[in-house]
Image: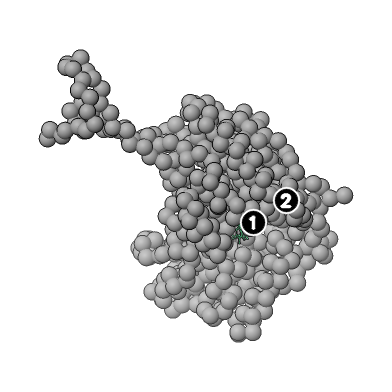
Amino acid sequence: MAEKVLHWIDGELCDGSGSQIVAVENPATGKEFAQFNVASDSDLDRAVASAQKAQKKWGALSIAKRVDVMYKMRQLVLDNQDKLAKLIVEDHGKDYSDAIGEIQRGRETLDFACGINANMKGESSTNIATGVDINVIRQPLGVVAGICPFNFPVMVPMWMHPLALATGNAFILKPAMQVPRVSLLIAELYQKAGLPDGLFQVLIGDKELVTSILEHDGISAVSFVGSTPVARIIQETGVKHGKRVQALGGANNHAIVMPDCDLEFAAKHISAAAFGAAGERCMALPTVVAVGSAGDKLADYVKKHADAITIGFGLDEGVEMGPVISKAAEERIVGLIDDAEKRGATIVRDGRGFRPEGYPDGHFVGPTIIDDCPLDAPVYTNEIFGPVLVIVRAKTYEEAIKIVNAQPFGNGSAIFTNDGGVGRRFALDVEAGMVGINVPIPTPVAYYSFGGWKNSLLGDTHIHGPEGVRFYTRAKAITSRWPTDSGPYEATMSFKRED
Ligand code: NAD
């Protein structure tokens, strides 16, 4: 009997009233183990109504009381880390230590939210005219929603909800359908932390539910993280319906490897960045541009590290890399490798058809290294989102940076070099939102904001950190004058500047 996955509306678990039934599969075993009915429009209406009611009180509560809930939640996430990580591994497939890592990175936003008292301060000026002051405060938007991808079931929603809640909003989470269960545990933890019912809710569904969220009058803003084509739909539809939207899209992160770098150091980090989480990270490193002589040895150096990776089910001892999310993902990735081979690229390490012992029906692709890849190969031009490293060659830095900047995404980008001048030049030249110098995955800590350029981010607001606070609040400028004992108060609708 398959486990029944429920939704979380107004502080309790409840069945979805949509007619579509969706199965949840463990990608390592290929076996379906749970299922759920999607949330319907009436479920959404119910969630929005209870969110609106709860938000009125929550938004007016003292910051100290909201922060208190955030501190308790932070501790509960820490105490329940193991439980959360196991759910991530079973639904998503990543290995246990990577799941712990994502929870820790997600918790950083809870840390930041605990300091919201210092981080949502307004501005004020005194005597902008005689006896007149201006005070700019930031107020919550109301009910906001988050639509999330499958690849970070805890961390990506945590880029959103701690800040949305700490700033005084109610939050409706729409997790990806492949990884629904861990969000329900997060909901329970918020309840234990003392968050009033209705402020954090989880509705599971796909395109239809997302469309209803985007069109719902009761929702003021939508945060989205996922692929670029869907980010575009979210931004266009959300804006058309008067919503504030932040939409983070896909990526094809590149690193330049300069001939002067420490190649052993670079290879180790490139292997981890390309194959960690089976390449299913928006900050994964699927492409390296090897400059000059760096190209002669790089593939072999990376292969040594790739050969040492233990692959399997993420809860088994010692496993460092799991499957990809689905059979369809495996077939797509294998198809891209087949095509690159036909185009004359060298397959230095071939992960096609790989199956770890005991998991014949899992959706695995072993670490794959493709050298000398032509720039028109789809494995290079597409976001692979699998454990594949593509190496392209360039003769000079100038040629390499042109290749990096010609691609349509601009999430993260890195350079490996021992020359500080080249590192600095790269940081200024590269068209990407997050840059690493000898750091292959330059994901900012949560007290800075996260976001890419070009097709990796639509709209202008990055996520979490200071930009997250701005996104979930709106400014109100209050100009005031008060009668003083130095003279009678003259009621007037305007004030006169005397300077
Ligand atoms: P996806 O775009 O397929 O799905 C994301 C969310 O949108 C899911 O909740 C899904 O149910 C919903 N959705 C899917 N199709 C939709 C449609 N047509 N209309 C409305 N909603 C729809 O992404 P995914 O496969 O779940 O995740 C992988 C993608 O996310 C990759 O492209 C990856 O780069 C990207 N990602 C980006 C970042 C970032 O910070 N830029 C972070 C993580 C993942």
Question: From this viewpoint, is residue 440 visible?
Answer: no
Residue 27 x, y percent position in the rendering? 75, 59
Say which residue appears at 59% left-offset and 74% top-offset: 379
Is residue 429 toward the left or the right of residue 216 in the image? left
Eyeballing the image, is 171 above or below 394?
A: above
Q: Which mark is residue 168?
A: none
User: Which is nearer the N-term, disc 2 or disc 1?
Assistant: 2
Q: At which x and y percent is residue 25?
A: 77, 56
Question: Is label 1 in a helix, a strand or a loop?
Answer: helix
Circle 2 sits in a helix, a strand or a loop, which is it? Answer: loop
Residue in the picture at 56% in, 61% down: 230
Q: Is residue 180 toward the left or the right of residue 402 in the image?
A: right
Amino acid residing under circle 2? Gly
Read off the residue under disc 2: 18
For the point 67% across and 71% down, the residue is: 332
Residue that badge 1 annotates: 208
For residue 219, above or below residue 436:
above
Residue beneath the point at 60% across and 52% down: 212
> Residue 189 sits in which quadrant?
top right
